[in-house]
Image: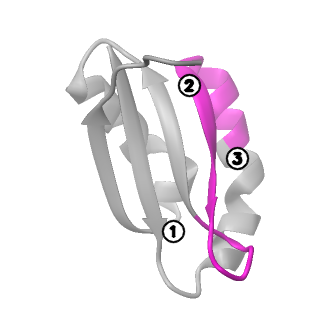
Amino acid sequence: MTFAVITRDRPGALQIRKDTREAHLEYIAATGVVTMAGPFLGADGDMDGSLVILDVADMAAAQEWAENDPYARAGLFESVEIRAWKKVIG
């Protein structure tokens, strides 16, 4: 199944994102379940959240992936929403 992980960074946490970015990208590569991903940008152009599309067995697997993301472990996120998602175009 496909899931969208939608996150919003805690205010003032840009440095956490920058410091943890390499570990986050390594986690994405190592897990092999991310089909598309990228940061959201605030009005100032700085990264302030993420959209990650996962191809995993079920919601439990999506939640486990999200909880183990180095960004989440570093306390970057103010909120995390995981929703089943159906690709139609692209």
Q: Quadrant of residue 15?
A: bottom right
57 horizontally vs 34: left or right: left
Mark 1, residue position:
76
CA separation in Å, label 1 and label 3: 13 Å
Structure colour scheme:
one colour
Residue 38 lies in the magenta-colored region: yes
Callout 2 secondary element: strand
Three-letter residue code for mark 3:
Ala
Callout 3 secondary element: helix
Q: Which of the two marks, 3 or 2, is nearer to us in this view?
A: 2
Identify the residue shown where x is 59% and y is 17%: 32
Callout 1 secondary element: loop
How far across and how far down the image is residue 14, in percent? 66, 76
Identify the residue shown where x is 22% and y is 28%: 60
Instruction: Tell me: residue 59, above or below residue 87.
Output: below
Identify the residue shown where x is 45% and y is 66%: 8
Mark 2, residue position:
34
CA separation in Å, label 3 and label 2: 15 Å
Quick one: 71 or 4, which is closer to the camera? 4
65 horizontally vs 82: left or right: right
